[in-house]
Structure formats: C-alpha cells, structure tokens
Amino acid sequence: MAAKPSSTAVAPTIEEKRIVEILSDQILLSDQIAVAVNNSHSFKPECSKVGKQVNRLCQMLRSAARLAISSTPFYDRPLRRIAAEVSLNLEKSLTLARKCRPRSVLFRLFTIVSTADFDKLFRLLDSSIADMKWVLSIYDASNGGIPPIAIKDPILSWVWSFIASLHNGQLRDKIEAAGMLLYLAKDNDRNKQMIVDEGGVLPLLKLLKDNSSPDGQFAASSTLFHLSNSEERVQAIIDDLGIPIIIETINNSSMKVQIGVCNLIAKMAEHCPLAREDSSIVYSYYIYI
C-alpha cells in the first residue's frame, strides 16, 4: 500500500519568500499591534509610545513595498537582512502589548510586565526605524551614515550601498560604485567574499556588458578580476552567466577593456578548473593574444 503524502507543509523561510510578501506580512503584523495597543489596560502611556513607533515603522515598510513593486530588478539583499530584524522586533512588540490587556489577577501574577521591558523594546524599535530609514535612502542614492544593523560591521553597509548604486544609479554612479567595490576587494578576501555573497557579481557583469561606457567596462572587469582569486568566487561569476558576457566583451570592446578582460579570463582559469576547461572562453583568450 502506498504511503500517504504528508499533509504537513513547511513554511517558507524569510530568504525563500518574495520581499513583497515579507513586507506585507510585517504590515499586517503592525496592524495587529495597533489593535493590541488600543486594547491595552495597563502601561497605557508605554503602549501608546510603542504604537507610535510601530506606526512610523509601518509607513517605512509601505514605502519599501512600493519600491519593491515598482523597481525591476530590485536589489533586496540589505532589505531582507533588515526585514529579519524588524520581524523579530514587531513580534516582541505584539507580545508585550497583548500582555497589557485586561486580565485576571492570577494571570497577571504569571505575566509580569515592567517598565524595563518597554525601555528595551523602545531601543529595539528605534534601531529598526533607523535601519529602515537607511535602507530606503540607498535606493535613491542619498545614503549617509551607517545603519544600526551594520554598526559592528560597517563594511557591510558600504557593500550594500555600492551594489544598490550598481543596480539603481546613473552610469556615473555605477562606475564610481564599481571603483569603490574594487577598493574594498583589494583590501582583503573577506571583503571579496562579502561582495559576492551580497549579490555584487550580477550588476558588475551587467556593467561589463554595457559597451556604451568603456570606463564602466574597465571598472567592472577590474573588480571582477580581484574577486576571482578563489574557485568559489569564480564559480559565482560562471553561475551568473558571466562567461558569455566576458566572451562578448572581449570581441566587442576597446583595447583597454580587452586587456582587462583577458586578465580576468586568465585569473578565472588559474583558480577554477571549470573556467579553464570551458572551450569558448579559452578560444576567445587565445584568439586575442
């Protein structure tokens, strides 16, 4: 007898869900918090402050959702990371607000709430508001400062900002962003891996493909060259369909760009057997030299 299929569905993780779905869930959660705040019986001033902070956060979530819907493609890596923290803080807000509803004396004995709980929550919500304010700013290229989520690792906020500029900026902004990523990549392997992990390869390849700007192509090839000193990172370039773009560029670009791309090919082949064995890229390289 065949086994019955399991009826238990595994909920998608925050990384698997579309960013618009994640933001919609958080907006609905904010509405639930507003209801809980209105129904609060104890700590009403504190609950009111929570409601105001969550309302401000909700407005930012709505703005982010509008951006995600209207922008194609939409670079969502920083927003996803921040959304994970926002979700946790909204859940804490809902839990604390619900503890302040009218309850029996016995129930209150087992659900003790203090002003210290609210003070901690206020700080968490302030951090989420600052994070959301920052992440919204990078999508209009007016970023300044470092978000609380990246205080311990400021390089992360720079990488996010530069990759967002590669996606959303004007051509001059993209060239500058590629140059800044090159500067970070030259510094150490950790920065290189961060650029790859946060989705920097694909927009660099798109800039490399844009033959209307030799400066942009050269900046992109130089950055990709410095990312290509490990098999894993070269594989990331291959996975983002980089080889056809590289071949097209070496055949249809200025001498300066061709030299940069040849250096990139040699570096990729040095560190990755798959790149070394790709006949099309090897042929293009030897035809050029």
Image: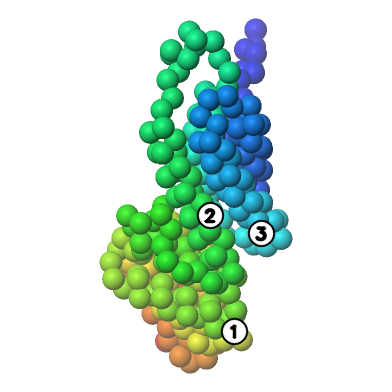
Q: Nearer the viewer, residue 68 or 101?
A: 101
Q: Residues within 10 Å of mark 1 (few under 14, many from 20)?
A: some
Position of the N terminus by quadrant:
top right
SS under mark 1: loop
Query: Residue at image x 35%, y 71%?
Result: 184
Q: Identify which residue is drawn at 53% across, 25% down.
A: 42
The span from disc 2 to disc 3 (Cα, nearest Å) is: 13 Å
Residue 24 position (above or below residue 144): above
Find residue 261 and report its image quarter.
bottom left
Identify the element where label 2 is drawn: helix
Q: Is residue 154 left or right of residue 94?
A: left
Residue 1: which disc?
Answer: none
Q: Quadrant of residue 253?
A: bottom right
Quarter of the image for residue 229 reads bottom left
Find residue 92 and report its horizontal and vertical position in percent. Answer: 49, 33
Where 161 falls versus 112 (above or below)? below
Q: Say if residue 262 shows up in the picture.
A: no
Q: Amino acid at mark 1?
A: Asn
Residue 57 in view (yes/no): yes
Q: What amino acid type should be assigned to the residue bearing mark 3?
A: Leu
How crowded pointer 2 is (Cα within 10 Å; few <14, some 14-19, many 20+) is rated as many
Residue found farthest to the left: 188
The residue that label 3 is drawn on is 67
Q: Which residue is mark 2?
A: 132
Query: Which numbered mark, 2 or 1, is in the foreground of this view?
Result: 2
Q: Position of residue 85 (x, y in %)?
A: 47, 44
